[in-house]
Image: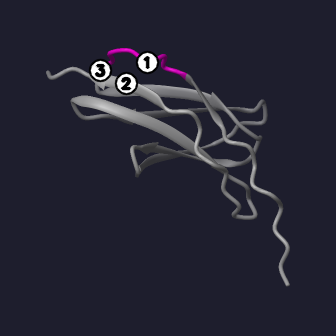
Amino acid sequence: MTVYPPPPVAPTISSPAPATIFSSVTLTGSGVAGDLITLYDGGTAIGTATVASNGTWTLTVKLSSGSHMLTATQTLTAGVTSAASSAVVVTVPSH
């Protein structure tokens, strides 16, 4: 029998604050050093980042025009994934 550790707590997204932004956005947040962060736009994964040794992560993504509800999950190296973070809603204006 394989015993997996409990899921980590959900990571945080600390920036950008909800606002109107342009198509390329850099998100930052916190998590457990070494874990993999997966960023979602609604239910679609749009990028990944590894949490640095200081407990922070950064990811730059391109978004289409419109409103986007962004969340993140954190996956331990053992493959156990957290619940989703609180959502951050950003709006990209039409160009």
Mark 2 neighbour density, 10 Å: few (under 14) some (14–19) many (20 or more): many
Cα separation, mark 1 vs mark 3, equals 12 Å
Instruction: Answer whether labels 1 and 2 touch (C-beta < 8 Å).
Output: yes
Which residue does the image show at 33% across and 35% down from the upper left?
Answer: 62
Amino acid type at mark 2: Val
- Residue 6 image-quadrant placement: bottom right
Snapshot quadrant of residue 32: top right
- Provide the residue designation for mark 2: 90
Q: Which mark is residue 22?
A: 3
Numbered disc total: 3
Element carrying mark 1: loop
The answer to whether residue 67 is left or right of residue 4 is: left
Residue 13, image x, y percentages: 58, 29
Secondary structure beneath label 2: strand
Between the residue at mark 2 and the residue at mark 3, the CA separation in whole angstroms equals 9 Å
- Colouring method of the image: one colour
The image position of residue 68, as x and y in percent, is: 34, 33
Q: Which numbered disc, 1 or 2, marks the residue that appears first in the sequence? A: 1
Q: Residues within 10 Å of mark 1 (few under 14, many from 20)?
A: few
Q: Position of residue 9 (x, y in %)?
A: 74, 43
Residue at far bottom of view: 1
Compared across the picture, whether 17 is left or right of 74 comes to left
Q: Amino acid at mark 1?
A: Pro
Residue 17 belongs to the span the image colors magenta: yes
Residue positioned 50% across, 33% down in the render: 87
Q: Residues within 10 Å of mark 3 (few under 14, many from 20)?
A: some
Q: Main secondary structure of the magenta part?
A: loop
37, above or below 86, in the image: below
The answer to if 84 sits in the magenta stretch is no
**Residue identified by numbered label 1:** 18
